Amino acid sequence: MNIASNKENRNMNTECKKCSSSKYVKNGNIRGMQRYKCKECGCNFTNTKLRGCSPEMKALAVLLYSMGKSSFRWLGKLFKVAHTSVYKWIILYAKKIPRPTVPEELREVEIDEMWHFVDSKKNKLWIWKAYSRELKRVVAWVVGKRNVTTFRKLWKIISRDNCTYYTDAWSVYSEVIPRHQHVVGKQHTLSIESNNSNTRHRIARMTRKTKVVSKSEEVCAGHEVRAKGSSPLWAEIERSIS
């Protein structure tokens, strides 16, 4: 039995599970299996499969979540894991993504706030977005309450001397934006309203009538990076599975 086991081990590509080194020595037995000790990092390991989900599976889950209306629970059933595990994978990838840099040459920007909630509709949350007409995309966003304090956070990011800002008639905007840079009227915010509509259409938890809900403010803050091909998310995923 031991001879057959040793022959099997010699035929397998044994390597350290921590540093992937092929330099190791035998180091006793555990639960009837040969144990090895890595010469490079000192890690003890057995020649068995790694526990947990592979990086490829996690990356695929993130891709499916990013590309369509896949909920955490649906992905959990698909990959046969807890939905909380899928949530942790998404958060892990999201933390690796740097916030987009706002270009200095902004000339025309539309601003609007989009209503949302976390877990329950009692916990209201507002996503404030700034849409560049030249770049035809959202260049900055913040999440928080629907008040002047939250808007000032966004204004600090997008404020430019030679830029014109288009908003609706809500009073908060006129409190912060200089009058000579401010254009008011719903007819001037069609692009960002269209962007809001696309966000609600493409992301399940942003749809108004849905059973899919956001689990944290952190997830909401990263909602814009889910547009296919428009963020570093895709490059990060490709690196993890290559």
Image (spheres, rainbow, N blue to C red):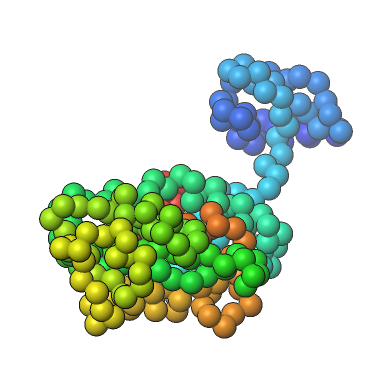
Q: Nearer the viewer, residue 15 or 194?
A: 194
Q: Is residue 31 visible?
A: yes
Is residue 157 depicted above or below 42 in this figure? below
Where residue 17 sits: x, y (%)? 63, 32
Which residue occupies the extreme left position in the image? 162
Q: Closer to the camera, 119 or 159?
A: 159
Task: Name above or below for residue 194 compared with residue 27.
Answer: below
Q: Examine the image and state in which quarter residue 110 appears.
A: bottom left
**Along the horizontal axis of the image, is 6 left or right of 118?**
right
Q: Position of residue 28 (x, y in %)?
A: 81, 21
The structure residue drawn at horizontal position 45% and vertical position 76%, both measured from the top left corner, is 200
Asked where in the image residue 224 lies, by quadrant, the reply is bottom left
Which quadrant is the N terminus positioned in?
top right
Residue 224 visible in the current orientation? no
Total marks placed: 0
Q: Is residue 224 above or below residue 235?
A: below
The percent position of residue 196, horizontal first and vertical second, equals 38, 74
Question: Which residue is at 39% across, 79% downward?
Answer: 197
Percent x, y for residue 12? 64, 36
Q: In the figure, 221 relative to 169: above or below? A: above
Q: Is residue 153 left or right of residue 184?
A: right
Q: Which of 189/86 is in front? A: 189
Q: Of 162 and 107, which appears nearest the observer? A: 162
**At x 71% / y 59%, what residue is drawn?**
82
Q: Is residue 133 left or right of residue 123?
A: left
- Which of the 4 image quadrants contains residue 49? top right
